[in-house]
Structures are given as structure tokens and as C-alpha cells.
Image: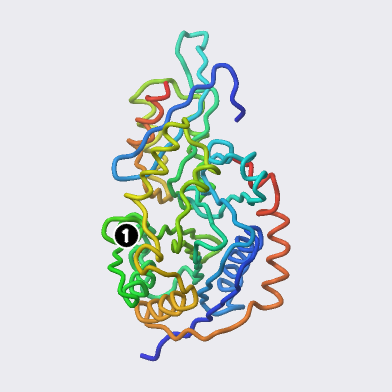
Amino acid sequence: MPTQPGTINADYKAPGGKLLRVQMQIVAGADGVSRIHALKITGDFFMHPEEAIEDLERRLTGAPLDEAELRARARAFFAGDVQVVGASAEDVVHALLKAA
Amino acid sequence: MSKLTWRLLLTGDKSAFDNMALDEAVLRHVVDDQSPPTLRFYGWEPSAVSIGYFQGIEQEVDLEACRARDIDVIRRLTGGGAVFHDHTGEITYSLAIKADYPGIPAKVVESYGLLCGGLVAGLQRLGIAAEFKPINDILVHGKKISGNAQTRRFGGILQHGTLLCDVNPRLMFSLLKVPTEKIRDKLIQGVEERVTSIRRELGEVDKAAVTDALIAGFADVLDIRLIPGDVSADELALMERIKGERYANPTWNHQR
């Protein structure tokens, strides 16, 4: 995702784990709710299978910037058939909220 | 029970593109029973920067600085952080086994300790007080000497990692992106406190002797027989193909 106006960045170091770097674009919908329009999560963590990162980004894209909603989506991903090493669902939520 | 037999590959110095493609080609052949479980040691010529699968290449690497110094930049198949692979300052290993290899924990995070054990035992043979530090590091008196990364794909497990022989923090941090020049200086100074090397621990670097110790360490810890062998013609052909599709391909390297 190219850096462009409206792109916000945040780095969040998971305690005892790895660095999560979030780049995202937020848009305010007609209903007045701010949503994640585009999202890229990078960093030195591990995820098995690796391609699952795209699934995580897809699940979070379109989400309202609401802590409970982001947590529900992150947890649903982590509960699936994936091993993430160096970051938890809660770390992803923290990184997103830090960026927002 | 008789020991399992592995192939030992000493492939010398190669380009980053050859090295990463060969790791994957060997893994695929091991998975398909075309090759035995394999432990490989190698070096980098020219020096290179590798980034983890999930890292942003522009975020982590000063591509202009790398170009100016003829240093290759490559995205790994494995996660983890950016690494400067110095031509003279590093010994690199990779090991490739099938996913159902006996005794390997199903959880990746639990398997690092076992697979890094070969390095730990090898360093201890040299009189270095190495210890595994979760998640994926090896430390000596609290300072990092080795970083390791694993992927599980195609029905197999590939783990590769580095052993620092010599540290050149000024060069390393001139190639990696850092927030500010002030922080660059701090990072360079911090390496003294956080990182060590074979040279710092032993006063000299004899790569052949260190590699021999690591080979013995892996043989001990994994209870295997390591038989020196060669890369097969099929593996070399696959390496060339994978290199074009992936590691020497800007689409792969710039995907994040």
C-alpha cells in the first residue's frame, strides 16, 4: 500500500514478542462511523501458514474503529487454523487502536 | 534404534537469490522423498540483507544504500526480522525435514528450542556458554549470537539461521532504515551491549572449525548420522526455477 494522504502508521511492540507495524486508511462512512478502508500489517512476527496474513487483513478491512468489534475479528482469526508466533489477537487490537 | 541418516551440504558462498532458492528447492525435494533430511551450511557472496516474509521492504531497508554498496536485498520464505548477511562475518545454516519427522513438536514455538539445540551444543563444544532464548534466539552471557527462523510449508519444515562471526554494526545500520541519525548512533553503540560474535567470544574466527563443531552439535542433539553429500541436479534445476519465480523477482521482494 503506497503511503498517501490519510494513511496512518503505528508500530506496536508486543510484550515479550515481536513488532507489529500497521499502515491503514480510515474513512468516515455516511453513517458517521469511521471504518478501516485499507490495511497492511507488517513486522518481524511469524505466522504459519504465512499466506494467512492476507486473511487477517481482509477480516479487519471494513471494520468499524470499535475496540470490541476489532477484538472479535482478531480473535476469530487467531482461533482458526493458524499459528502466530510473537503476537496475540490482543496485540493486533492494540496496534490497530494505536494507529487509529 | 539406529540413527537416522541425514545429508550434510557444504555449499560455500552463493548469492542471496541462490541461497534462498536452494533452501526451498531442498525442502521440496526432502518433502517428496527425493532427498534425505538435510543440514546445509553456507555463506553469502555478495553480502546481502534479508527481510522477514511479513516485513515491508521499503520500511526496513535503505534500498539506495544497498544498491550503492552492491548489497543484494531479498525477502525470505520465513518470518522474523531484517538481517545483514556479511560475506565474511557470518555462518548460515538451514535444515529441511518432513513435517512428520519424529519428535518435532507440532507447535512451531516449541520446536525452536529443539532445532536450535544443535547450534547451542556446537557452540558449547567450542567453550562458548551458549543458551537458547525463546522465541528464536541464541545468547551468550545475555548477548545475541544467533537468530533463527522457521517455516512449515509444502508438508515440510525449513529452519534457517545465522551465527555471527564478526559484527559490523556501522555498516549494518547504514543499510537498514532507522528513525533518525541520532537513533542510528544509539543503535550502533547498543550493539556492543546486545550482540556478540565468535570473534568476541574466542578472539579469532576459524569458520571451518566452527562449522565442524556445529555439525557435531546437530548430530548429537538430533541423534543423527550426517553424511556429506551433494546438491542433486534436480535440486539445482528447481533452484533456478524458484529463483526466477520468487527470490530474484521484484514482485516477490516488494510484495509488502
> Callout 1: 10 Å neighbours few (<14), some, many (20+)?
many
Where in the figure is residue B219, as x and y percent of width and height?
40, 81
Q: What residue type is labelled 1?
A: Leu
SS at mark 1 in the image: strand
Residue B107 in which image quadrant: bottom left
In percent of the image, x 73 and y 62: which residue is there? B241
Q: Count all numbered tags in the image, as a single digit.
A: 1
Residue B159 in the image: state x and y as whole percent.
47, 64
Image quadrant in which the N terminus of chain B is located: bottom left
The chain holding disc 1 is B
Is A6 on the left or on the right of B187, as rendered? right
Q: In this view, does B67 lie above or below B89?
A: above
Toward the viewer: B58 or A68? Answer: B58
Q: Which residue is drawn at 51% across and 44% down?
A: B54
Residue B217 occupies which quadrant of the picture?
Answer: bottom left
Which of the 4 image quadrants contains residue B116? bottom left
Name the one closer to the observer, A93 or B219: B219
Q: Please give left or right for residue A50 compared with residue B28 in the image.
A: left
Residue at image position (57%, 61%) is B87
Viewer-nearest residue: A29 or B241: B241
Q: Nearer the viewer, residue B184 or A26?
A: B184
Q: Mark 1 points at which residue?
A: B139
Give the percent coordinates (x, y) of residue B33.
58, 77
**B224 over B181 or under it: above or below:** below
Q: State the image coordinates of residue B152 (x, y, percent, origin top left).
A: 49, 60
